[in-house]
Amino acid sequence: MENSKNILEVRNLKINFNTYAGKVQAIRDVSFDLQKGETLAIVGESGSGKSVTTRSIMGLNAPNADIAGGTIMFKDQDLLKKTRKQMDEIRGRDIAEIFQDPMTSLDPTMKIGKQIAEPLVIHKGMKREKAMAQALEMMKLVGIENAEKRINDYPHQFSGGMRQRIVIAIALVNYPEILIADEPTTALDVTIQAQILDLMKELQTKTNTSIIFITHDLGVVAGMADRVAVMYAGKIVEYGTVDEIFYNPKHPYTWGLLNSMPTMDTSGTELPSIPGTPPDLLNPPKGDAFAARNKYALKIDTEQEPPFFKVSDTHYAATWLLDPHAPKVTPPDQIIERQKHFAKLTHETIHSNRGKHIEEEEQL
């Protein structure tokens, strides 16, 4: 659906990889939007197609990747039709990316101040002295202490968390309109992870940057995203607002992901996991790709691919369980408990706000 607030529109994207074994259908008809200033999380297991999707936005797919169809519209231009040189101009200026491992993103032989300043010199033709002054300001903005002294340090002189802050500084120094964050906190411990996520949210508020957040960790999504797209076997199988995905999930794959996520109430040491493994995309299965791992699968799942069923104006899921003729299936207990907990919180919030309004009216 066309929307003036959309800064990015991906439509019917299909990407194959040509390998010795044959053609791997890595991305199979993916569509989504990104709105100005929002965070869209794309979640799913390894190999679901999350990174391949975002690499195509950046024009960084592997040489054996074949764009078999679709469009990626940014500012009324199809990024898939851009030349390598045109994409070099867009990357780092309009669209930037933070990768998973900061050590592989940074040049170990170059001082970090120079690395942060480099995009300003390349994309804006800024004089080196002015670019270094702006790099220093960006270092302070991302929370690097003693920035004046540390601007001449090398990457190995920083901790993992600080290196990731440097990578964020490089990505944001040109104030890009879109920031792609590909598992940016996976290599960090939980405390540093929380600091980096808070930093990204704070910087997003200041710069109004739109973020695509790639992760397999639904716990990260809860506090970070506005909307969520759940990917499986090269397709988006469910998307909606973060509350809809967490508290009213409809696809059995989403149930499995949520059910395997620890909560404060999780007892014991073993978490439920999704049985089986994702399908081989050299020969994608007929029907629903998740059917073989889905204990709620219907006969039609092995024969016909499910369409997207509308749950609400913002929530869609591709599962035959939403068909009016499908038998009623109850999600796992943990999902139901989550829904009850959310309903209770919502109820308490409404009553709290209502009481507050009454008090305010009485004061008037």
Image: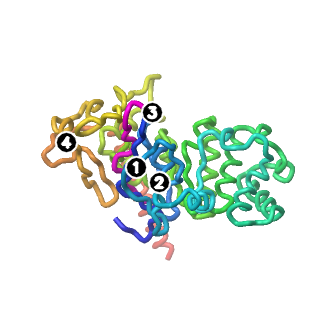
**Residue 63 pos. (x, y %):** 51, 44
Pointer 1 residue: 229
Disc 1: CA contacts within 10 A as few (<14), some (14-19) or many (>=20): many
Q: Identify the amino acid type marked 4.
A: Gln
Q: Spot the residue most to the front.
A: 20
**Gap in angstroms between the C-alphas marked 4 and 1:** 22 Å
Pointer 4 residue: 304
**Residue 239 pos. (x, y %):** 36, 51
Which of the two discs, 4 and 1, labels the residue nearer the N terminus? 1
**Gap in angstroms between the C-alphas marked 3 and 1:** 26 Å
Tell me if I can see residue 351 in this picture: no
**Dot in front, 4 or 1:** 4
Which residue corresponds to the image point at 73% horizontal and 54% vertical from the top-left?
A: 116
Which of the two discs, 3 and 4, labels the residue nearer the N terminus? 3
Disc 2: CA contacts within 10 A as few (<14), some (14-19) or many (>=20): many
Which residue corresponds to the image point at 48% horizontal and 46% vertical from the top-left?
A: 222
Which residue corresponds to the image point at 39% horizontal and 43% vertical from the top-left?
A: 16
Marks 3 & 2, CB-CB < 8 Å contact: no
Marks 2 & 1, CB-CB < 8 Å contact: yes
Closest to the observer: 227 or 49?
49
**Residue 111 pos. (x, y %):** 80, 47
Quadrant the N terminus occupies:
bottom left
Which of the two discs, 3 and 2, labels the residue nearer the N terminus? 2
Horizontal placement of 250 versus 170: left or right?
left
**Residue 245 pos. (x, y %):** 38, 48
Pointer 3 residue: 265
**Dot in front, 3 or 1:** 1
Q: Which region is colored magenta?
A: 20-33
Horizontal placement of 315 versus 147: left or right?
left
